[in-house]
Image (cartoon, rainbow, N blue to C red):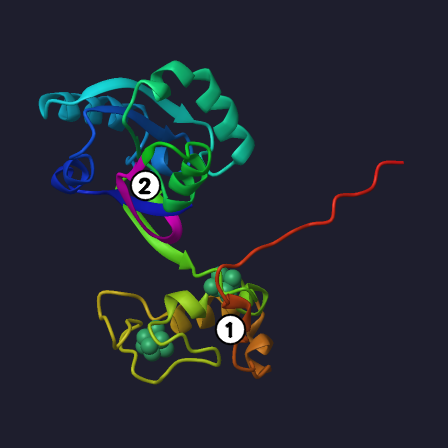
Amino acid sequence: MIIQKQKPIEEILESLAESRSVFIAGCADCATACKTGGEEELAAMKVRLEAAGKTVTGTAIYDTACLSGEVRKTTAAHQAEVDAADAILVLCCGSGVQTIGDYLDAKAVVPGVDPLFIGQVIRAGKYEEKCQACGKCILALTDGICPVTRCAKGLLNGPCGGYKNGKCEVDPEKECAWVQIYERLKARGHLDKLRKLQEAQDYSALHRPRRLVWDRPKKA
Ligand code: SF4
Ligand code: SF4
């Protein structure tokens, strides 16, 4: 899940300063779970834009706004409303904004959301970072707790020694990831995993922009 928060309305209006009419797009996935671009948020944004003197030509929730095929299909279903707008305001992550933007070359495409991190939704309004997409996942060695992300120093071979009462020395409000890893391995009888020395992560996989292309199986 891409955890995100909506931009302040002042910033959104500044980006829309040259646009008199706006089409608002949201996403049924992460943006709905984070309450940035679901049905409720689109309806509320419509009211705010109209109060600021804008004409809202229409709204649409994309099932998944970063899926090219889905964006093509949903945009086509709202073509008249999209064509009538000077700008598209997209209330979802940057990947969704760019996917929608790729299909609307001639339109201003404006982001209404700041994406923050890949995380877990504990409940609506409570989100925690869990993964940095480092390119070489080592969760098998820690029974599912990521030290790259959840240890403040990203340590791979045990704690730094500064933790106190299970809390991190960098931020005492947070759990020490390595205490959590130790407790989980112990509870599951997997403490032997700690004997394996981890080599430094190979961050060459992080060269940006990253891209993954699968060969499609050939048809018989
Ligand atoms: S090791 Fe951590 S940051 Fe890397 S892919 Fe796994 S969960 Fe994500
Ligand atoms: S106290 Fe624990 S979580 Fe904090 S930096 Fe040290 S090992 Fe990492």
Tell me where the magenta segment starts and ends, as one range: 109-120
Give the camera-side residue of 105 and 179.
Answer: 105
Q: Residue 82 sits in which quadrant?
A: top left
Q: Is residue 107 left or right of residue 56?
A: right
Answer yes or no: is residue 145 visible: no
Answer yes or no: is residue 173 visible: yes
Does residue 111 belong to the magenta stretch?
Answer: yes
Residue 44, above or below 68: above
Mark 1 Cα-neighbour bin, 10 Å: few <14, some 14–19, many ≥20: few
Quick one: quadrant of the N terminus?
top left
- Which residue position holds label 2? 123
Give the camera-side residue of 85 and 165.
Answer: 85
Give the camera-side residue of 16 and 202.
Answer: 16
Residue 52, above or below 186: above
Q: What percent of the width, then of the height, locates residue 168?
A: 28, 73
Q: Is residue 112 left or right of residue 204?
A: left
As measured in the structure, the alpha-carbon distance from the residue carrying label 1 to the one carrying label 2 is 32 Å
- Which residue position holds label 1? 203
Nearest to viewer (mark 1 / mark 2)? 1
Residue 178 tag number:
none
Q: Is residue 59 left or right of residue 98?
A: left
Magenta residues, dominant SS class: strand
SS category of the residue bearing label 1: helix
Quick one: quadrant of the C terminus?
top right
Q: Is there a contact, CB below 8 Å, between mark 1 and mark 2? A: no
Disc 1 residue type? Tyr
Mark 2 Cα-neighbour bin, 10 Å: few <14, some 14–19, many ≥20: few
SS category of the residue bearing label 2: strand
Disc 2 residue type? Arg
